[in-house]
Amino acid sequence: MGQIRVTKCPIEGLYVIEPAVHGDERGYFMETYNQRDMEEAGLTMNFVQDNQSLSTKGVLRGLHFQKQYPQGKLVRVVRGRVFDVAVDLRSGSDTYGQWYGVELSEDNKKQFYISQGFAHGFLVLSDIAEFCYKCTDFYRPGDEGGLAWNDPEIGIGWPDVTGTYLGTPSSQGYVLADGTPLNISGKDQKWAGLKDTFHF
């Protein structure tokens, strides 16, 4: 391997990617993507779109996927800190319905590759977070799907989040440890749980 280290996660199709960071008193340099290193790790995806978002503390985005045109995503944080999560929606998978999460931050510079067939979302833990990701297919508004972020059947362990599940994906009553309320879009508060959602 070269400048990028790829580690398989416990759920097949998920990978944590760590670049080699070269720093001195002037700052640092790193390769954030290297096709050769990815291919040596068995990852031969082709990216067609790059996206970037900015969110404030307590924002929870997800859990999202595309149904007929599923996307693989390589995600990272360039400012701040988030907890990033993928949920396996592949019906033939031994880990269907299971989740895996990793903290991504400007300090640890980790990246998370989420193959096609997963729902994806993240929670912002810092005051501000800038989130970047590469996609293997284009965004198609009419193809969107989603999964309830707090479905007890999945049981995602969102860090620092407290609240009582009221049978819906509403953010009402949920806060971070410092009292910051969860900030979830209206659309993301209407998704169904695992048993009633789309699967690949």
Image: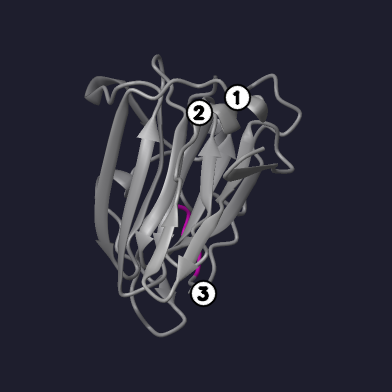
Residue at 52%, 25% in the rendered image? 116
Name the kind of residue labelled 2 in the image: Gln
| Front residue of this view, candidates 54 and 178 | 54
The residue that mark 1 highlights is 39
| Residue stretch rendered in magenta on the structure | 164-168
Residue 138 forms part of the magenta stretch: no
Q: Which residue is mark 2?
A: 35
| Label 3 sits on residue | 160
Q: Classify residue 197 as left or right of residue 61.
A: right
Within the image, what quadrant is residue 79 found in? bottom left
Q: Secondary structure at mark 2?
A: helix
Q: Within 10 angstroms of label 2, few (less than 14), some, or many (20 or more) residues?
A: few
Residues at discs 2 and 1 in contact (Cβ within 8 Å)? yes
Q: At numbered mark 1, what does the secondary structure look like: helix, strand or loop? A: helix
Mark 1: amino acid: Glu
Tell me the quarter of the image containing the C terminus. top right
Disc 3 and disc 1 in contact, CB within 8 angstroms: no
- Gap between marks 3 and 2 measured at Cα: 36 Å
* Magenta-colored segment: predominant secondary structure: loop
- The quarter in which the N terminus is drawn is top right
Task: Give the residue type that dot 3 points to.
Answer: Asp
Q: Earlier in the sequence, mark 3 or mark 1?
A: 1
- SS at badge 3: loop
Query: Where residue 123 appears, x then y in whole percent?
Result: 42, 60
- Which is nearer the N-term, disc 3 or disc 2? 2
